[in-house]
Image (spheres, helix red, strand yellow):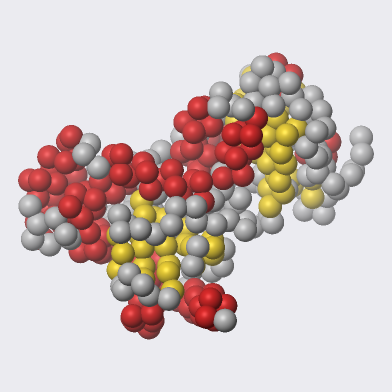
Amino acid sequence: MSDDETPLNAGTAAPDFTLPSAPDQEVKLSNLAGKPVILAFYPADWSPVCGDQMALYNEILPEFEKYGAQLCGISVDGVWCHRAFSQARHLQFPLLADFEPKGAVARRYGVYRKDDGIAERALFVLDSDGVIRWSHVSPIHINPGADGILSALERLH
Amino acid sequence: MAQLVQPVTEEDHIAGPVNAPLTLVEYGDFECPHCGAAHPVVKEIQQLLGDTLRFVFRQFPLTQIHPHAEHAAEASESAAAQDAFWEMHDIIFENQTALADRDLLRYAAAIDIDAEQVAEDLAAGTWQTRVRRDFASGVRSGVNGTPTFFINGMRYDGLLDARSLLAALRVSGGRASR
């Protein structure tokens, strides 16, 4: 496993992974093949603002669905934390727990902040063949919004 | 840097001169406490900048976390059709903790507009499309939570206090006049 700090670029095949999305459920990336996938790495559940990044994406879900895309949020928080956060925000898409070994998936995508022990705020849009078509890392305190994701999904068509 | 994709037009709710040199656009949610906190800040800035500023409010209700936000937005649009958008906007932000339909109608009556018309509009969903249109333009412009401000078309990512916002407006205004 590399600790490469450069996020994977467009044109790279997205590394496959399996992560828990609930105490008794897992998501395997390659099982999502056939539709575009949005991977949204973020630092932590429970950021203290309304309309934080995940809550915002939850509102925009219908727009993503127009492109047939599946959204997955990923942070190093554990499944129980994700569950509480997801319930509090009424999230209607899976949050994946990159918890054990901590940040392993974020590392493979080149978006792990070793010193902080959390994922970057990083977005990857994958086409239906699992190839990264767009990626973006935003400053950790700046929620990137959804315009970049939507433009990337548009370009897939 | 995120940019406003939908320019300000006469369809917008605009406070201040239409051709003012500075434009501040807010995408806001009437039930969002951060928007409530920003409300007096905007008021202060409007006072300080006077006729050099036009302030535009666009709807961005986060309906999954704020159950009353959608109707509050629609009620303000209904008020706008009665030429009272800003009165409704202000009274809603000043009473953010009570935003059930009956409260919204009470505010409509308090600002002297036809509350029955507002009730009819809410029941019929008359202003849903309008609210969705604002929301969609916000998403496309990189709105990343509420409130999100744009200064002369560029997203403002700084602190939401009057001093910071004012400084950013002045920098942007200086750039524009050069």
Indicate the quadrant where residue A129 lies. Answer: top right
- Quarter placement of the N terminus of chain A: top right
Instruction: Residue B145 in the image: state x and y as whole percent.
Output: 49, 52
- Residue B75 is left or right of residue A69, and the answer is left
Instruction: Residue A108 in the image: state x and y as whole percent.
Output: 84, 36
Q: Is residue A26 above or below residue B6?
A: above
Residue B56 shows in this picture? yes
Q: Is residue B137 above or below residue A85?
A: below
| x 50%, y 56%: residue | B4
- Quarter placement of the C terminus of chain A: top right
Residue B40 shows in this picture? no
Instruction: Residue B35 in the image: state x and y as whole percent.
Output: 39, 60
Q: Is residue B80 above or below residue B71?
A: below
Q: Is residue A145 above or below residue B153?
A: above
Query: What is the count of numbered marks?
Result: 0
Indicate the quadrant where residue A124 lies. Answer: top right
Residue furthest to the right: A2
| x 31%, y 73%: residue | B17
| x 56%, y 67%: residue | B158
Instruction: Residue A71 in the image: state x and y as whole percent.
Output: 60, 31
- Residue B106 is left or right of residue B98, and the answer is left
- Residue B4 is left or right of residue B38, and the answer is right
Q: Pick the residue in front: A145 or B83.
A: B83
| x 7%, y 52%: residue | B114
